Image (tube, helix red, strand yellow):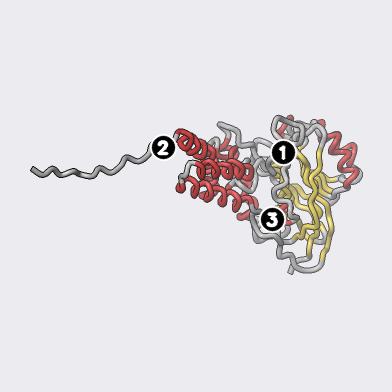
Amino acid sequence: MTSVRTAVAPLPPPVRPRRRLAAWASGLLVAVPSVVVGCRLIGVDAVTPVPQLLSFLPWLALPAGLALLPALLARRRLLAGWAVLVLAATCWFVLPYGPDTTTAHGPVVERLRVLAANVEFGQGTEALVETVRRERPQLVYVSECDRLCVRTLTAAVGPDLPHRAVVDGQGSTGSVVLSAYPLTAQPPIPAVMGMPGATARIGGRTVQLRLAHPLPPIPRQVDAWKRELGRVADFAAAQRDGGPVILAGDFNASQDHAAFRSVLDAGRLHDAARLAGAARTPTWPREGQGPLPPYVQIDHVLVSDDFRVRGVRFLDLAGSDHRAVLAELDLHAGR
């Protein structure tokens, strides 16, 4: 009697515990960057904690990059490829959003400086007075400027900036635009915190001025944040084919938020910091004002195609948790 022996395939070697641990570590490291980059890709930022996490997007390249090493140690090619993909997408989105120049035509009819500052419930007012006296801007957009703040600014810099558009309020609800040029009042953009507006004759042209200060995207308030940024976008869209526009302030949003990009796109507006090569310079929180270092740019000076940007600087204001943005602009005559 002949016996037949059947060859049995050897069992695969057990996964080594260290490789399993490395694979888990890689997966955990790449998980949050994957979600955030995915939301950035499809333009979703209306659900907590997505808007908050999008503010950290450039910094998420670090865990995405670190995820690659344990994936390679675990010999998980799919996981390593995923980490590379997420890292590449993160680095791509870190690039500045929008064109790097305007299409301004004609001779320069006015050179001006525009300063946007959040004085945090008026606490940075005195520092702002010193900054205005030193930098001598022609337009100053001040968020969270209460009644005492308005009175202080009027008394201190009124001779140089005698015209103003105000939304009267206490705490964070008050705001003011100070101007060296005569102003014609315009309706503010409806919001919980003041967004005053006006027109000014600058260099023979009528320039639309609006201060932006939507609510921050904290939990249970994200819908209101997006709604108010939508109203800012509606204003920008209404001016799209009009004259020059300067829209500035604390937007509580960065280029990684779809709601902010919609403002730029709706009005064909340009971020002055982007045009000056400083699109990723953080403005919040100011150094020493919290447990985190400055990590996100939420204060902006946006301009229409009628302007060219000579430069942008970011200035510390004692008493405020924001850095101010000072933009040097050339207004052109147009076609």
Q: Is residue 287 left or right of residue 38?
A: right
Tag 3 or tag 1, which sits nearer the N-term?
3
Q: Which amino acid type is marked by label 3?
A: His
Are there few (<14), some (14-19), or many (20+) residues within 10 Å of tag 3? many
As drawn, the residue found furthest toward the front would be 1
Report which quarter residue 288 is drawn in: top right
Give the secondary structure at mark 3.
strand
For residue 176, say whether it is visible: no
Q: Is residue 167 left or right of residue 36?
A: right
Is residue 290 positioned above or below 81 on the image? above
Q: Which amino acid type is marked by label 1?
A: Pro
Are there few (<14), some (14-19), or many (20+) residues within 10 Å of tag 1? some
Q: In which quadrant is the C terminus drawn?
A: bottom right
Which residue position holds label 2? 15
Give the x, y percent position of residue 190: 64, 41
Q: Which amino acid type is marked by label 2?
A: Val
Which residue position holds label 3? 270
Instruction: Give the camera-side residue of 106 and 207.
Output: 106
Instruction: Give the camera-side residue of 244 and 105.
Output: 105
Q: CA distance from mark 1 to mark 3?
A: 23 Å
Disc marking residue 294: 1
Tag 3 or tag 2, which sits nearer the N-term?
2
Is residue 299 positioned above or below 97 on the image? above
